[in-house]
Amino acid sequence: MTFHDKLLALDRRWVFLVLAIFVILPILPFVKFSVPVTPVKEVREIYDFIEGLKPGDYILLSLDYDPGSMAELHPVAYAMLEQCYAKKLKVITLTLSATGAQMVEEIVRDVADSCKIYHGFKPERGIDYVYLGYKPYPGIIILGMGMNFRIPFPQDYYGTTLDSIPMMRGIKNYDNVKAVINLSAGNVSDMWVADGNARYGVKLALAMTGVMAADYYPYYQSKQVFGIIGGMKGAAEYEKLCKNPGSATDAMKAQVFAHVVIIIFIIIGNLAYFLGRRKTAQTQESE
Amino acid sequence: MEQTASMATQIWTTVGILLTFCLFSFLYKDNPFYKFAEHLVVGVSVGYWAILLYYNGINPNLFSHLFVFTNDPTTGAEFNTWKPKFDELYYLIPALLGIAMWTRFSRKYAWISRYPLALYLGISSGIAIPVTMKNNVLTQLRGTVVGLGFDWSTSGFLGVPQSIWDIIVILGTISSLIYFFFSKEHKGAWGGAARLGIYTLMIGFGATFGYTVMARISLLINRIQFIRDWWNMIS
């Protein structure tokens, strides 16, 4: 058995083991180094837009993901919500992901609590922010909110009618919010672009998992969305802009090592494949 | 600020760690621990979904229009009593349509389910077709072509004038479409354009693959961070 035969027959569990080692090592507590993170234009545009809003402006954050996508979208949700609270914006939050309902409630509460520690004030529920909760069938909900938030959400997550919530008085539909930021781990982003942006002209930005990101860049180029935060790298860039380094920034160290290892494995795999192909061709020629 | 996790948090986080290891054990080979964790996830998810959809879907959208529910005044238990309401009886129509969907389980009456399905598909198509045409065809087409403003002063990606990138995008789009046009043999100039198309598609697939690798590694990193934070918590 030649060297490249051995490489091609390598048990894939060795690949898992090597990758695991190179992911674990960089994020151990005693390993101290950082990776430079440079925010790209499409991430910066979302940050600049929120920074440009005035205190009291309304913004809608649709956190349409579940615990399975926490790794990539939680850092954005935390950094963006804290930015909105710190800017004293009125934040309407909701989720169109069934298994995200309780998780989003925790984010909204956590960030409000941490504002007291880091910004010296605690945003109040019903005055500074509202959490509408979850409703099934995202497309219909997005269309319904275009007419009136009260159609799909007559009450908030806690059962309070929207008209009894001080910050929702006089707030009818998308016309009353400056923008919608959709954090999504599925096709809800398509619905926001189609039903929110195309039908109602909502000013829309997207934050999404890495798997989805490449598919949504055409919407950015055609200006259907004004910004895109793609995957954990986008999340780290947003944390950097907010000067709020968190789990995404921490993870970039492991990302760099993991990518180097994967690239090396791809090179080795291709080398073994081409060597094997050349050997097969030589054998056929000699026959 | 130093915070101490409660005993309940420590116990549940430890359960989470054990389940994480159960799932990772599949990387070595299939085993009963992995099967247990997998079935637990599916079971918990189904139970959670069922309750959530009842309280956020069926109950507020249907039952609350047909019945008056009252909580027990002493214990506060939900829906202690209920009585029918007659002022919104038209809600029975969607209820009947919903029930009709369940006839699919009967060979004899499965035809009834075609009526709610036909209605659902009709409404969905009516909403989706014009929006999709505008969103995914017309606006995308405009985004591809109108960008060609011949603005040589604006610096784009890698410092190259944006107009160069605009021309590359148009060439890439047209050549990719040519690759999928099979009514004419891919030979000569047409074949060259199709070859350019396949290169463009490969660049697209490469970008998607790169993002997918990052996404999968992100999930692994998140679990490692979870284990690291648990270790810090218990020690």
Image: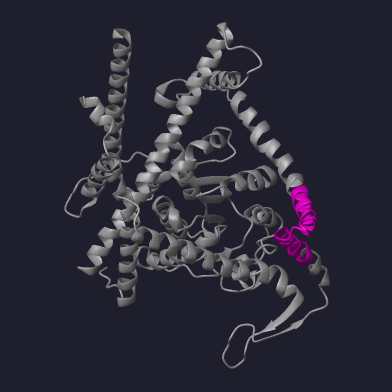
| Magenta stretch: helix, strand or loop mostly | helix
Q: Can you name the residue that lies furthest to the top here?
A: B188
Residue appearing at x 34%, y 71% in the figure: B12
Query: In the rendered image, is residue B221 in sight?
Result: yes
Q: Position of residue A15 (x, y in %)?
A: 27, 40
Specify start and end residues of the magenta stretch as a single range: B95-123
Q: Nearer the viewer, residue B157 or B218?
A: B218
As drawn, is A277 to the left or to the right of A140?
left
Residue B176's spot in the image, x, y percent?
56, 22
> Outermost residue toward the left?
A30
Extreme residue in the front direction: A287
Q: Is residue B99 found inside the magenta-colored segment of the image?
A: yes
Q: In this orientation, does residue A246 appear?
A: no
Q: Position of residue B100 (x, y in %)?
A: 76, 62
Residue B135 or residue A60, whichever sits in front: B135
Say whether residue B59 is left or right of residue A107.
right
Q: Residue at x 50, y 61 (%)?
A: A100
B17 in relation to B135, above or below: below
Pick the front one: A226 or B93: B93
Q: Which residue is rendered at x = 21% and y = 26% of the image?
A: A1
Q: Residue sitting at 49 percent across and 42 percent down?
A: A212
Q: Nearer the viewer, residue A281 or A83?
A: A281
State the quadrant of the C terminus of chain B.
bottom left
Q: Quadrant of residue A116?
A: bottom left
Q: Position of residue A149 (x, y in %)?
A: 66, 61
